[in-house]
Every structure is written in structure tokens, then in C-alpha cells.
Image (spheres, rainbow, N blue to C red):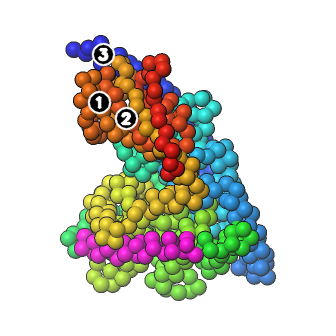
Amino acid sequence: MINKKTYSRALKAFRYYGLNVILLSVVTGLFAGVIVTFYTISTGYGEEYSVELYKLLLEYPAFIPLLFVGLAAGAIVIGTLVRFVPMIRGSGLPQAEGACRGKVIFKWYVTLCSMFAASLACVFMGLAAGSEGPSVEIGCCVGEGTGRVLRRSYMIRRLQVAGGASAGFAVAFNAPVTGMVFAMEEAFKSFSPQVFISAAVSVITALGVRNGIRYSLGLKVGYAFEGFTFGETDIAGYGYMALAAIIVALFAVAFYYLVFAAKKLFKKIKFWRGTGKYLIPFLLSGAFGLITVYAMGGGHSFIVSLGSSGGAMEGLSVWGAGLLVSLIIIVALRFISMVLYMSCGVPCGVFVPMLAVGAGFGAILSVLFVQAGMNPADSDYLIIVCMSVFFTTFVRAPITGIALVFELTGQFTNLLPALLGTVIASLIAEVFRLEPGYERLLNQFVRDEGFNTRNRKITATVKIMEGSLADGGKINKMIWPSNGLVVSVTDAEGNVVVPGGNTVLHAGQTIVFECETSDREEVMVSLNEIAGKQPEGAALCAEQQENQ
């Protein structure tokens, strides 16, 4: 039988995390669905426009110099915008993760409008730019905006940021499960019922809006990569997949090191207050687009063409070269573009372009392996596995990688090959001791923008009040203020214990919470929400003097 204390806590949790979070998540999902859907539709038209423009220029080469003048002007404009709005630097994914964890502070309306405009301009100019990374950041801004406009607390806003980011991811890929997994594996780096509920409600609402809009406009609603077919395979097929996974993972390791090495070099370029460095990726992208249109755009059409029923792989050719040479050229150009975009900080998506590079490596290896005796029917498996391997090695998010593969293809028969690939990718990334790519980019962003220097270390002592959210709850199920942890728990008898994630808190206990923050008052408001309103005159917080 449920006692009064348990009932009181459950009722309060339902009001706080139930009605509050669910209703706000619906609003977040609604607006994220509308904005991100129109953004992705716009980028789709942008890719088609830029491809047609480059084809036209090849027919009238006298106008090619104008293309590079326009690209140079665009590079300076976008580079200047990034200098004033650093939150849009790169794909926006690291910043979105930092916002979910409370590590970065940003103006949601400025970031949303700037990322929307800048990344869309990159697509129209013909860069190998995707829409998925910016979609996540746009969704993150919508979540922050919802919490701000409706004047919700810091902790509720963080949940809405995570929900908005998940909704943006799901709308961009039409992948609801991957969107929710992304929120927990990448954004929050932990699972909690509150994060799950917020992400799930936002994703469901946003996808409903997305599919409704696309259906009403007569646009495709289904899976992203439908050109792949998967049948039965044998032990030899798994052997080829394992070998391909090892090879592609090693290329991903090289990609990882090249990105961060080039990042150091770009920091040394001070031309036009640092905006001049954007000329390099923009002008090279123009040259790559003139070589082959498969080096342009996010890479969705390129990936689809690689499938056995995708329709174009056998006819794929660059300057009349054979299939194998053409694939090598396309993958090389895309590989270089990704290194330049990520290291320079071009505000464009690199999520699908990264998948396209992995799929391209898989296509190259499938051509070689078929000549060596592999069953041609295993080629689609090989391509999808390599796509997942390249992503997993760099990002270090294996669960997201696995979920992404079968949600994008709409088929679950590739689960075992994808699992094999992600295990190999994770092992190789561990051998080379790779820090997760987006995590490292986030840490560099926090350091470069000085977010860490604004924080001071504080120690707060709060008492667990009866009927509060913390009363009867586990420590790891609470959404605590970012950059902090519970360091000790003292019961009513004065016994002190070192807490763990599964430690259950009870009314009457006193906890000591340490964190680094630039806003002491916000931390205390959050702790009061969790532990309950403290008695009048209680000394709650002591700030340490040294800067962190």
C-alpha cells in the first residue's frame, strides 16, 4: 500500500516533471517541427539550385571567375558573422551538447536566426554541407526560447534544450529513436526519466508536424536511404565486413587527427581578423564542385546512389573515369572538404557528409572485394557498415550509430552487421585513445570562448525537505546543476556517507553539493527545486575565492 509520503512525492514529481515538462515539450516539439522542417526543405531546394548552377557554369566557363568572386564574398560575410556569433561555428552540434549540459550560455534568438541563415547560404553556394547539425542547434535554440519566454527554471530549460535538440535531430533524419538516443548518449551523457520524457514528447510532436507539412506539400515522408536491399549473408560475408570495418576505422582515425591538426593551423591565420581563413574552404569547395557535383551538398543523393537499388552507382563517373577511380576521387574530395569545414569552423552540417564519406569508402571496398570473390549481394551491407563505422570512430557514440543505420534504411536485417562494425570501430578508437570528437570540439569551444574562466567554485549545503523531489529519490535520477556533484550526505543522527549514483535520499538528510558556476543564484534556485524550500535564515552557499 502506498503511504502518504510516497504519494505526496509522486504527486509533486508529476506536477513538476509531468505536467510542467510534458506541456512544455509539446510546445517545444511544435515549434521545432515547424522551423526545422522548413529549414530542411529549404536546404533541399538549395542543393538542387547549386547543382544546376554549377552544371550551367560548366556549359559557360567564361562565368566561372564570377563563381569564385561570389564564394570569396560569401566567405568573408559568413566568417564575420561567425566572429560575432561564435555559437554557430562549425556544425553547431558541440555547442548544442554544451547547452544541454549547461556549459555554454547563448542568446537563443540570435543563434537560431544566424545559424539558419549562415548554414543555408553555405548550401546555396555549393558547399558539401548538410542540414542535420544545424537542425539540432536550431531545435536546441527553440527549446531554450520556449523555457525563457514561458519563464521556466534553469533545470526545466535544460530539459527543453535537450528535447528541442532531439526534435531537430529526429526531424532532419526522420529518425525518432535515434533522436532520443542522441539526447541521452551524446547530449546529456546519462539516462534519466526526465530527459527521456522531454525528448520523447518533443520528438513525437515534432515528427507529427514534420510529416504533416511534408505530406501537405507533396514531399517525401519516408526513410532517408531507401536504395539499399539486404538479404542473407554467410560467414565469408561477415569476414569481408569485419575487414572493411577495420580499414574504414583507420581512415576515420586519420580523419580525426587531421581535423584537430588543421584546426591548430587555422588558428594561426589572422588575415582580416581571422575571417580570411574562410576563403580556403569556400574557394576549394567551388573547385571541387566543378570537378563533380557528387562533391557538393550533404551527400544524401550520393549515399542513395551507392545502394543496389539506388539507381546510379554503375553509371557514376568523374571526367569519364571508371567506377573505382570515380569513387576514389569523390571520397577524396569529400574527405578534404570535411577536414576543412570542421577545422575552420564553417557553419554547416557535417553529419550526413561524414556518413557519405564512410559510405563512399564502403563502396570502394565493395568494388575491390567483389573482384576478390565477395558475393555482390553483400555490397549493400558493406556500404552501410562502413558508414556506421566512420561515424562511430569519430563521434564515439556506438548506440546512436547502430540506431541510425536501421532507422535511415527502414530495415532491421542489417542490425548484426552494424553491431559488428560499431564494435570494431569502438575497439580501434579505444586503441588510439580517441576522445569523442564532438566532446573535444566542445571543450575547445568552451575554452576559446572563456566560459570556463567565468566560473567560480561554490559549495552549497541544503537539507532534504519532506515531500520534495529528492525525498525518496536516487541521486543519479535527479537533474542537478551542471558541472557539479553531491559530495557528501549527512543523516539526522550526524552520520556522514560518501554518496554514489544509486544512493537514495531521504527527508531530514543534509547534502553538500559542489559545482563550478557563473550564476550562484541560479544554482540555489535549482537546489531548492530539488531539495525543497529551505528554512528562513539558513546558510546555503559558500563561494570559494579562487577562480577556476
Query: How far is the residue under mark 1 from the one under mark 2?
Result: 8 Å
Precedes in sequence: disc 2 or disc 3: 3
Q: Nearer the viewer, residue 204 or 115?
A: 115
Q: Nearer the viewer, residue 66 or 468?
A: 468
Identify the image quadrant of the N terminus. Answer: top left
Precedes in sequence: disc 1 or disc 2: 1
The label shown at residue 18 is none
| SS under mark 2 | strand
Residue range of the region highlighted in magenta in the rendering? 238-265
| SS under mark 3 | helix
What amino acid does circle 1 point to? Thr
Q: Residue at x 27, y 39 (%)?
A: 498
Query: Crowding near pointer 1: few (<14 within 10 Å), some, many (20+)?
Result: some
Left or right, 351 with reference to 384: right
> Does the magenta portion include 254?
yes
Query: Crowding near pointer 2: few (<14 within 10 Å), some, many (20+)?
Result: some
State the count of labels.
Answer: 3
Q: Is residue 501 above or below residue 268?
A: above
Which residue, given by chain and number where applicable, does mark 3 sit on? 5
What amino acid does circle 3 point to? Lys
Q: Residue at x 29, y 30 (%)?
A: 490
Precedes in sequence: disc 3 or disc 1: 3
Q: Nearer the viewer, residue 159 or 221?
A: 159
The label shown at residue 490 is 1
Which residue, given by chain and number where applicable, does mark 2 sit on? 512
* x, y percent for residue 19: 47, 24
What amino acid does circle 2 point to? Val
- Give the prevailing secondary structure in the magenta stretch: helix
Question: Tags 1 and 2 in contact by the CB under 8 Å rule?
Answer: yes
Left or right, 388 with reference to 204: left
